[in-house]
Image (cartoon, helix red, strand yellow):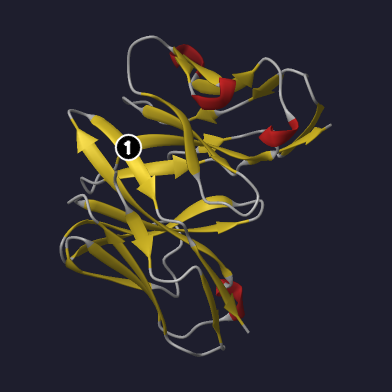
Amino acid sequence: AQSVSQHNHHVILSEAASLELGCNYSYGGTVNLFWYVQYPGQHLQLLLKYFSGDPLVKGIKGFEAEFIKSKFSFNLRKPSVQWSDTAEYFCAVNAYLEAGANNLFFGTGTRLTVIP
Amino acid sequence: DVKVTQSSRYLVKRTGEKVFLECVQDMDHENMFWYRQDPGLGLRLIYFSYDVKMKEKGDIPEGYSVSREKKERFSLILESASTNQTSMYLCASIEERESRYEQYFGPGTRLTVT
């Protein structure tokens, strides 16, 4: 079965530290890849997405992610985090299902706490 | 802008009640989804629909049913609510263009079953 793994459940960083959140998926076909962010009390927002082309994708708020096909990975990075980046981050992979519909498979999320 | 709306932001129901969660999208998307979000478990797919009157079970369909009578509306039904169905429920629809897909989420309904 398809799966998306986020190995870090809770990450705590000081402001200005660099961030890397891991995401691995198991689907072998063509995939679209996403990172979503959910700030406390708010709904999911799209941070960035990869469909094709340059494997290094830049998103909003200084985030970027790199798609490494050979490693089935799509890690999220930010060179210098801010207190306002405190949120939960979800990796997601879009893949076709046998029934003909598309679905988005989510990781379990990584909670990021940034200490001022 | 694509809009996915959900009928309620917060809902409190008693055990055994029948609960309807409504979701409407205004972009003529064919595929719609219902997820629940729980701490430490991420988003889990309950049901999805890829056309009017079509539905497929997701990962955790037990205790739920769905209805898709019109393309823009996808309803999630809890036939007899239980306390373990207390959760945040998210509706989404997918836009498909030339093998590119983007999923749009509603704001969520936080359901508490007492």
| Host chain of mark 1 | B
Which residue, as the protein is rendered here, is positioned at the far top? A54
Q: Secondary structure at mark 1?
A: strand
Badge 1 crowding class, 10 Å Cα cut-off, few under 14, some 14 to 19, many 20 or more, is some
- The image position of residue B79, as x and y in percent, is 41, 83
Q: Tag count in the figure? A: 1
Q: Position of residue B87 (x, y in %)?
A: 57, 66
Q: Position of residue B94 (x, y in %)?
A: 29, 45
Give left or right: position of B58 versus A109: left
Query: Considering the image in quadrants, where does the N terminus of chain B appear?
Result: top left
In this orientation, which residue lies closer to the viewer: A62 or B63?
A62
Location of mark 1 (residue): B102
Vertical order, A100 against B18 (above or below):
above
For image coordinates 41% across by 66% down, the residue present is: B61
Residue B103 place in picture, x, y as percent: 35, 42
| Residue in view at x 15 percent, y 62 percent | B52
Screen quadrant of the C terminus of chain B: bottom right
The image quarter in which residue A50 lies: top left
Q: Is residue B114 above or below residue A15?
A: below
Relative to B5, residue B7 above or below: below
Question: Is B55 located above or below residue B12 in the figure?
Answer: above
- Identify the residue at image location x=61%, y=42%: A109
Say left or right for A80 vs A42: right
Instruction: Residue type at mark 1: give it.
Output: Glu
The residue that appears at 29% across and 55% down in the rendered structure is B32
